[in-house]
Image (cartoon, rainbow, N blue to C red):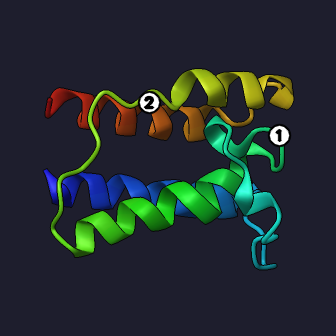
Amino acid sequence: MSKVVQRLLDELTAELKQQQLWSALPADPIAMQSSLPFCYDTMPLQQWLQYIFLPRMQALLEAQLALPSQISVLPMAEQAFATSGGRLGKLLNIIASIDSVLSEQA
């Protein structure tokens, strides 16, 4: 399971970079203080993926801790990237795969 999740996280990182949605700048500390889901009030979804989701998932994998189950990032991603004109289809497919793999473990 963890190898599959790691591969998907690597694919997500690569696709964010490929689509130029990866920031070279560090996260804004104030934006990181949001208490809302996906920090949608302080940062775009691609930053949440980069600064919060990916590091937390990586930390869980490295510590061999239980991964979250029943996650649902795809609906938010579909909404956040709705104006992309379809160019982010691969990114959405990767996110869908992550949702699916983690939800299957429950």
Q: Is residue 94 visible?
A: yes
Instruction: Residue type at mark 1: give it.
Output: Asp
Instruction: Residue type at mark 2: give it.
Output: Ala
The mark lying in front, picked from 1 and 2, is 1
Q: Mark 1 — residue? A: 41
Q: Find residue 71 and report its horizontal and vertical position in percent.
A: 38, 31
Label 1 and label 2: CA atoms lie apart by 23 Å
Kindly identify the residue that appears in the image at 78 percent across and 22 percent down: 82
Label tally: 2
Label 2 Cα crowd, 10 Å radius (few <14 / some 14-19 / many 20+): some
Q: Mark 2 — residue? A: 96
Find residue 97 and name its label: none
Left or right: 105 as drawn, with respect to 79: left
Label 1 Cα crowd, 10 Å radius (few <14 / some 14-19 / many 20+): few
Q: Is residue 86 visible?
A: no
Q: Quadrant of residue 21?
A: bottom right
Left or right: 101 as drawn, with respect to 26: left
Image position of 70 with respect to 36: above or below: above
Q: Quadrant of residue 72?
A: top left
Kindly identify the residue that appears in the image at 73 percent across and 50 percent down: 34
Q: Find residue 54 and report its horizontal and vertical position in percent.
A: 49, 61
Q: Find residue 100 and report its horizontal and vertical position in percent.
A: 31, 28
Image position of 94 with respect to 21: above or below: above
Q: Find residue 76 and report its horizontal and vertical position in percent.
A: 63, 26
Q: Are marks 1 and 2 in contact (CB under 8 Å)?
A: no
